[in-house]
Image (spheres, rainbow, N blue to C red):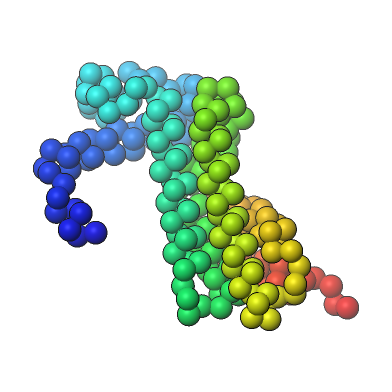
């Protein structure tokens, strides 16, 4: 990584800084005004970059939205991949870490998450169907990672021999719902950890007393 960074020229670093500053500004405006209520002129004014400069990096606000969402989904995917590759961890620990990591990711990126969930039906299907397709493919890859973890747990005798794919899909849905709730609850870290632990135990141990 350090060697790769060293090969990046000063101009490339400056370009990436400008691009990120413009994206950060667009995100802030998207969060307050919504995608359709945001104009390129507003992004130019708030970022203090002329429109000509902005158009060097983005074709318009659609590309900004596209890049914001895609960058974050890829980041979450890398987190799950890192968890899945921990060879010394049990499947149980990997899944719990993945749940907690997703909740933390949602809290730390709440603006992007809120925008994507609220605007998805209005934007993706009509204006950017290819983005929706890419997100769905990435989601499928994340489910595949969970499936591999459940396969590990079944082999090691941690889990019952239910179909790993079906369990992975259910777990993915639960993890998303539990993490999504973080954005609407006034809970400190202790309360969040208690809630996630309870949810994880309900999933892994069940709720029946029989």
Locate the N terminus by quadrant.
Answer: bottom left
Corner quadrant of residue 21: top left
Measuring from the top left, give residue 114's x and y in whole percent.
Answer: 53, 40
- Which residue is the extreme one toward the right? 210
Q: Nearer the viewer, residue 163 or 55?
A: 163
Q: Nearer the viewer, residue 191 or 75?
A: 75
Corner quadrant of residue 169: bottom right
Relative to residue 122, is residue 93 depicted above or below? below
Residue found at x 34% / y 22%: 59
Residue found at x 28% / y 22%: 55
Measuring from the top left, give residue 202's x and y in whole percent.
Answer: 72, 69
Residue found at x 14% / y 50%: 7
- How many dots with numbers? 0
Locate the C terminus by quadrant.
Answer: bottom right
In the visual, does 169 lie left or right of 30?
right
In the visual, does 170 lie left or right of 99?
right
In the visual, does 22 lie left or right of 36?
left
- Which residue is the extreme one toward the left? 10
Residue found at x 51% / y 33%: 131
Measuring from the top left, give residue 20's x and y in whole percent.
Answer: 29, 39
Relative to residue 210, is residue 124 depicted above or below? above
In the visual, does 206 lie left or right of 89?
right
Q: Is residue 138 visible?
A: yes
Q: Nearer the viewer, residue 183 or 50?
A: 50
Relative to residue 182, is residue 133 depicted above or below? above
Q: Nearer the viewer, residue 145 or 26?
A: 145
Measuring from the top left, give residue 158's x and y in whole percent.
Answer: 67, 79
Q: Is residue 186 visible?
A: no
């Amino acid at each position: 990584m350090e060697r790769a960074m060293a090969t990046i020229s000063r101009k490339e670093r400056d370009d990436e800084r400008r691009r990120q500053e413009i994206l950060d500004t667009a995100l802030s405006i998207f969060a307050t005004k919504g995608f359709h209520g945001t104009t390129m002129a507003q992004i130019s004014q708030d970022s203090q970059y002329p429109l000509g400069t902005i158009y060097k990096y983005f074709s318009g606000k659609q590309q900004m939205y596209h890049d914001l969402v895609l960058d974050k989904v890829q980041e979450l995917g890398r987190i799950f991949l890192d968890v899945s590759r921990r060879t010394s961890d049990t499947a149980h620990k990997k899944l719990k870490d993945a749940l907690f990591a997703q909740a933390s990711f949602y809290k730390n990126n709440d603006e992007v998450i809120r925008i994507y969930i609220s605007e998805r039906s209005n934007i993706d299907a009509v204006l950017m169907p290819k983005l929706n397709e890419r997100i769905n493919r990435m989601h499928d890859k994340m489910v595949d990672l969970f499936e591999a973890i459940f396969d590990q747990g079944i082999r090691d005798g941690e889990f019952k021999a239910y179909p790993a794919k079906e369990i992975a899909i259910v777990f993915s849905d639960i993890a998303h719902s539990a993490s999504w709730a973080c954005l609407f609850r006034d809970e400190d870290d202790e309360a969040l950890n208690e809630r996630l632990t309870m949810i994880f135990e309900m999933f892994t141990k069940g709720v029946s007393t029989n």
